[in-house]
Image (cartoon, rainbow, N blue to C red):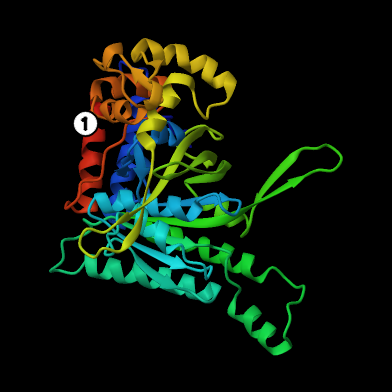
Amino acid sequence: MAKRKKKVVEQKSDHLGRPVAADSLMASVVVDMETKLGKKDCLIGKQSLSRVIPVPSIAFRYLIQSEGLPLSSIYQLVGSPGSFKSTMLAEVQRWHRICGGLNVTMEAETKDQEDLRWAILNHDYSACKVEECLTLEEWMQKVTWYIQTLQKKMDADDSAGRSVPVCLGVDSLTGKASEKTAKKIRETGHAQLGFAIEANMIKTYMQVMPSWLLGWPFNFVGINHLKIHQDPLTGMIDESIAGGWALKFQCLCIFIMSRIGRVQQKKTHNEANVRIETYKNNMGPDRLRCEVKLKTWNQKDVETGDLRTHGRFEWWEANVLLLFKGLGMRKALADSLLPQIKEVCDLHEKDGGSRGKLYWSTSLGVPSSDAMPAHDLGLMLEDRKDILDALYPVLGIKTRKFFEPGVDYMNQLEAAEAAELVQATE
């Protein structure tokens, strides 16, 4: 029997050295898969196509190594008590609101920080719906219900589609016991040692829920507690997060929040220094840090005359201090980056007397005679796209496509894929 001749395929490469035959084979497989599964199913899991929510500061962009906060993702805010985790959740929800979004917070700690939440959300009481949760199962049920109901309504024929970003927050993930544990305590009058029921339930839930976000302009932000232990023999510090390993695996980014020093009482406001560090970051290197001030003050409402708390994270001041002296950066990294930053955007400090430290910059068109507070100069920097674009490669910040409010999210993903294919063929 004659042997079958082997087909010899000439290995061709394009001008970049990419194997043409292999790429053509994969392209045909993808087309077949899209035909069988539906194009929508193939788009939703592609991270490079996802859109991002704008964030207000280059300091935070440096922290996450991205121009914005990706949608369809899981985030965690962890830290010790009093590290402003709940306040940061409200800040993230504010960013979604600016894009015309909705927010829901599952309050699972029975210590709702109502004043600070509404202070950060500018007393926009429609910006966030707060749901009280008495058990672990209750916050899971409510998260599930909100996701499924929002998806159903957004896909209805008479709706605007997936055009509204949503941030679902849980404060906190491990703040409540399960119904089984609560029932046993009510019956016996005390707690007992046993299996880690709550951790196992969270693990199982987090193995399922994240897939529901894919292809939707939804984000999930969980607050959790950081346990810090010191080995008595080595002195090494060990950080652990409650709730099991599944919580870590499913997160795009985990932020460690910490307060530096005490809250300072100024003449016109209170001020706290907050450090944010990435414990895990799928968008870039871990363990990057930035520092930002949280300012709060009381002010009478013009219409009602009631005294209300107002607050903001001072991101624009953080911009200048990060770029001028590497505030929050580790020393070795600051020594490496600051000279490169200065080549793009020179920043200078001078004593402003009663006004405190003032800053000026030739790159930003501000001479020494017009030096201003870091807040004002930081705002000017955010309006200079040319300088920001030059700083991004130095700081490792990747540019991303922003979410377009009012445009269906799947249409945005399809447009991004088409643009990516055009770019690949050039």
Q: Residue furthest left?
A: 158
- Please tell me which residue lies in front, 382 or 406: 382
Residue 363: image quadrant is: top left
Q: Is residue 328 left or right of residue 426?
A: right
Q: Where is residue 43 drawn, in percent x and y?
A: 31, 48
Local crowd size for mark 1, using a 10 Å CA cut-off: few (<14), some (14–19), many (≥20): few
Considering the image in quadrants, where does the C terminus appear? Answer: top left
Tell me: residue 124, above or below residue 339. Answer: below
Label 1 secondary element: helix
- Please tell me which residue lies in front, 298 or 377: 298
Would residue 311 be visible to someone looking at this image? yes
Name the residue: 80% across, 37% down.
235
- Please tell me which residue lies in front, 309 or 26: 309
Would residue 11 be visible to someone looking at this image? no
Q: Is residue 359 left or right of residue 328?
A: left
Residue 159: image quadrant is: bottom left
Q: Where is residue 204 drawn, in percent x and y?
A: 56, 65
Tell me: residue 191, above or below residue 353. Answer: below
Q: Hey, what amino acid is under mark 1?
A: Val
Residue identified by numbered label 1: 422
Q: Where is residue 130 drawn, in percent x and y?
A: 38, 68
Q: Is residue 189 left or right of residue 84?
A: right
Q: Residue furthest right?
A: 233
Q: Where is residue 297 drawn, in percent x and y?
A: 38, 49
Tell me: residue 298, above or below residue 194. Answer: above
Q: How many marks?
A: 1
Name the residue: 73% across, 87% down.
188
